[in-house]
Amino acid sequence: MQRISATALLLMTIAIVWSSTVCLHSQEPVKEQTMNQDTEAISTPGVNDLTIKVVFDNNPYIEGLGTAWGFSALITGTEKTILFDTGGDGSLLLSNMKKLAIEPNDVDVVVLSHIHGDHTGGLAGFLQKNHNVTVFMPESFPKKFKENVQKYGAQVVDVNQPLKICKNVYSTGQLGSWIKEQALIIRTKAGLIVITGCAHPGIVKIVTAAKDLMRDDILLVMGGFHLEWATKGGIEKIISAFKQLDVQYVGPCHCTGEKARSLFEKHFNNNYINIGAGKIVTLADL
Ligand SMILES: [Zn+2]
Ligand SMILES: [Zn+2]
């Protein structure tokens, strides 16, 4: 994974040098904006029209869309249009976007869950199409990575503590001790949607953090659950924890692994969502 990440950074650096016409002004990353612990999250109505399009995943869903190791999803219907993670490869990300009729210039915000190349590798390609975005990334990202993003003309926001990204959309803040990772929380009228990248800090820890932070019910948890190498017993413990947390729907994909996906399907039945490249989840489906 570290090798993939290093390659992605190298490719990004090469792309910047090659593309010498990009905006070269540099700026300091915006300091972390700690979530305002006021009553806004509780008093503002949650979104009632939301669409999540899975742009990049290693699991296939729609024929004709490319698959490769990684994850990326586009969220629309919220105040800002958000690209969560960028997959491992810019050209595949952009070609899948095109096939899904997504215009890169419509994206306002990019949220990067964690540093691994299968989540950040598509960023350089994306920024070449649209640098007019704010990129929220864990504060722990290397300085060089942040500078490279800024060289494209994009704004960088360091995330440490939980924070508000836009109306009804929040970050859990960077969690975990080894690989720091943030997850996205969307507050809907029907409950919270939590989207994870690889869930390195632990999927249950992430969902618990989201629930504690927002003090609301969990409608859906989707993304990579990082259970590829987990045992059946270990996965079943996680499924019971999900039930205890009263998670309504699950959409495990990316690094969740086939064994865990089928166990989640068995335990969640009709509330299991089969996620792969091209899958579209709307609030109306839940
Ligand atoms: Zn991953
Ligand atoms: Zn990872």
Image: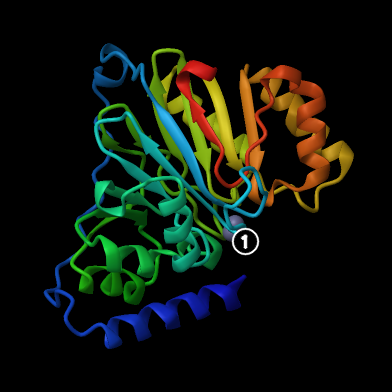
Q: Residue furthest left?
A: 25
In the displayed structure image, the side of residue 256 where residue 139 appears, left or right: left
Please tell me how many numbered marks the rendered image carries: 1
Q: Quick one: label 1, few (<14), some, or many (20+) residues within 10 Å?
A: some
Q: Where is residue 136 shown, x and y percent of the image?
A: 32, 52
Give the SS element for disc 1.
loop
Q: Where is residue 241 shown, x and y percent of the image?
A: 71, 26
The one nearer the camera, 138 or 250, is 250
Quadrant for ligand 2 reads bottom right
Residue 266 in view of the camera: yes
Q: Quadrant of residue 33?
A: top left
In the displayed structure, would residue 71 be above or below residue 161? below
Q: Quadrant of the N terminus?
A: bottom right
In the displayed structure image, the side of residue 165 where residue 176 appears, left or right: right
The one nearer the camera, 126 or 250, is 126
Tag 1: amino acid: Ala
Q: Which residue is labeled 1 in the image?
A: 68
In the displayed structure, would residue 106 be above or below residue 20? above
The answer to whether the beta carbon of the residue marked 1 is less than 8 Å from any atom of ligand 1 is no
Q: Where is residue 121 shown, x and y percent of the image?
A: 47, 67
In the displayed structure, would residue 42 be above or below residue 64? above
Q: Where is residue 122 shown, x and y percent of the image?
A: 44, 64
Q: Quadrant of the C terminus?
A: top right
In the displayed structure image, the side of residue 56 where residue 29 appears, left or right: left
Q: Residue at x 11, y 74 (%)?
A: 25
